[in-house]
């Protein structure tokens, strides 16, 4: 019998959870290739049909799977009560980490107003303090468990949520001056939709979650498979269904190495996925309302006047006008990480742009705040943030395609000029001809001027980047010396 690869094991475990009726949902909403869409109700809705040879997933199971494979992955699961948010995380945690369900349940915490730091992070050993005068910190079961589940996190008071941000972000926590490290594994939190017993989760806390999914109730045809596993309240438990076949035990370090080693598809030395994700990051970062100084013209600096309260600017309808906030550096890192993990899950040899576009909505929807402009375009974006991000990524991709074809002068494309100027800066050469410092300066100034003449916000970003690279290289240096 041939030994299974780590990818085959992960795929088999993913299928096993559904086949055993532990988490069943045939709401396929993530595709390895963009599906064909068939309009129904005169085009009011679209039904996706998978392309031959491609793979379809349910986001509520796919992303816990990918997150469980990370060193310290973090995931937020949002939805109505009683539809499997918590159990989905519990089963994914059990099957993909090998941690027993009992251990996961013992460590699980339930958000409530009485929750204390000691429940989440650690406490002091009072017996040793009293009898021996020794101050010893005891990590909580939640901290020590490889699978940390914080159920109904939005029922937790804001001050405790704030104190737990480092734990969610890095897997580390500080208690009474002692730095504590949790074992490798994922942290999953669930949140019901807002009601009278919930607190508002702050943007900084939400930003700590790499990925978020919206769960839905099962389709009516899924109920048969759910019932087929039996009713544990009648039959006594799930022991047999929770058994992990020995041949499906996975090697985490090998998987993480394989994911991390995934190369990106490239063109003429340019990594296409990174180039587009950086373009997306830059497209959402800019703010006309923040400042006339380009160094401070970012949404992070628009703390007095945001996109909604500002007067109409020059770039009406540009992608940046659809969000009130920008993306964090941790989000930029997560975009690369999950693109690689998704490409690996699909059995690819390199990361492609389709991999990035498939995961991006789930990495961003809980972090970006739509503006009134966005909600005017489609009021449903107030509820369906995933569709909002999908649409926004599409707008940014159109800008990216447009940029690739834009000419700053006959026969000279904007991107071609941009990369030529970067090469001139880096190598002090242009078309194989060596340049002195004065010529490099001339090339860069010419590129900045021509690219900056384009009436597009992304032209400002490219021009500013060239200036930044030049200033960095020649900072404090005399030309030609």
Image (cartoon, rainbow, N blue to C red):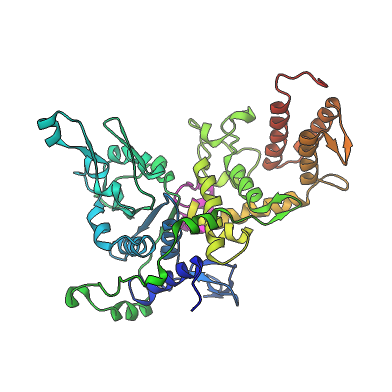
Image quadrant of residue 468?
A: top right
**Residue 22 falls left or right of residue 373:** left
Percent of width and height locating residue 246: 37, 71
Question: Which sits in the foreground, 354 or 16?
Answer: 16
Q: Is residue 103 magenta?
A: no
Q: Of all residues shown, which one is farthest toward the front?
A: 1
Dominant secondary structure of the residues highlighted in magenta in the image = helix
Percent of width and height locating residue 57: 48, 69
Question: Which sits in the foreground, 158 or 312?
Answer: 158
Image quadrant of residue 425?
A: top right
Q: Is residue 161 above or below residue 227?
A: above
Question: Which sits in the foreground, 263 or 166?
Answer: 263
Percent of width and height locating residue 152: 28, 53
Q: Residue at x 49, y 70 (%)?
A: 8
Q: Is residue 360 among what the camera can see?
A: no
Q: Is residue 384 magenta?
A: yes
Question: Which sits in the foreground, 388 or 19?
Answer: 19
In the image, the segment drawn in magenta is 364-389
Q: Is residue 181 among what the camera can see?
A: yes
**Residue 447 falls left or right of residue 67:** right
């Amino acid at each position: 019998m041939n030994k299974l690869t780590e990818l085959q094991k992960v795929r088999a475990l993913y299928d096993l959870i559904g086949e055993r009726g532990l988490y069943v949902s045939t709401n396929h909403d993530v595709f390895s290739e963009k599906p064909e869409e068939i309009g129904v109700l005169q085009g009011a809705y679209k039904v996706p049909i998978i392309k031959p040879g491609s793979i379809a997933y349910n986001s509520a199971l796919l992303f816990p799977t990918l997150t469980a494979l990370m060193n310290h992955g973090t995931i937020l699961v949002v939805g109505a009560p009683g539809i499997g948010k918590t159990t989905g995380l519990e089963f994914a945690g059990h099957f993909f980490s090998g941690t027993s369900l009992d251990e996961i349940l013992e460590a699980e915490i339930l958000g409530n107003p009485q929750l204390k730091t000691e429940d989440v992070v650690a406490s002091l050993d009072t017996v040793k303090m009293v009898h021996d005068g020794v101050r010893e910190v005891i990590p909580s079961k939640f901290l020590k468990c490889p699978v940390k589940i914080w159920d109904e996190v939005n029922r937790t008071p804001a001050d405790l949520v704030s104190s737990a941000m480092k734990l969610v972000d890095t897997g580390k926590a500080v208690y009474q001056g002692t730095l504590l490290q949790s074992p490798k594994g994922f942290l999953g939190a669930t949140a019901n939709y807002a009601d009278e017993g919930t607190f508002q989760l702050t943007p900084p806390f939400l930003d700590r979650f790499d990925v978020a999914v919206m769960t839905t109730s099962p389709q009516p045809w899924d109920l048969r498979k759910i019932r087929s596993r039996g009713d544990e309240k009648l039959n006594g438990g799930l022991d047999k269904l929770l058994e992990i076949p020995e041949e499906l035990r996975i090697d985490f370090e090998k998987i993480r190495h394989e994911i991390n080693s995934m190369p990106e598809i490239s063109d003429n030395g340019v990594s296409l996925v990174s180039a587009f994700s950086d373009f997306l990051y830059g497209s959402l970062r800019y703010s006309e309302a923040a400042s006339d100084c380009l160094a401070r013209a970012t949404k992070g600096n628009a703390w007095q006047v945001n996109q909604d309260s500002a007067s109409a600017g020059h770039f009406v309808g540009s992608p940046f006008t659809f969000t009130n906030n920008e993306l964090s550096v941790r989000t930029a890192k997560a975009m690369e990480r999950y693109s690689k993990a998704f490409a690996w899950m699909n059995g690819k040899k390199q990361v492609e742009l389709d991999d990035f576009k498939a995961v991006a909505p789930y990495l961003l929807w809980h972090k970006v705040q739509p503006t009134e402009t966005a909600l005017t375009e489609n009021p449903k974006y107030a509820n369906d943030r995933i569709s909002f991000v999908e649409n926004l990524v599409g707008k940014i991709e159109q800008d990216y395609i447009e940029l690739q074809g834009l000419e700053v002068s006959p026969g000279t494309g904007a991107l071609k000029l941009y990369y030529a100027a970067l090469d001139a800066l880096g190598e002090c050469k242009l078309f194989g001809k060596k340049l002195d410092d004065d010529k490099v300066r001339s090339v860069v100034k010419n590129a900045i001027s021509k690219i900056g003449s384009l009436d597009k916000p992304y032209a400002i970003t490219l021009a500013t980047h060239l200036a930044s690279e030049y200033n960095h290289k020649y900072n404090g240096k005399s030309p030609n010396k």
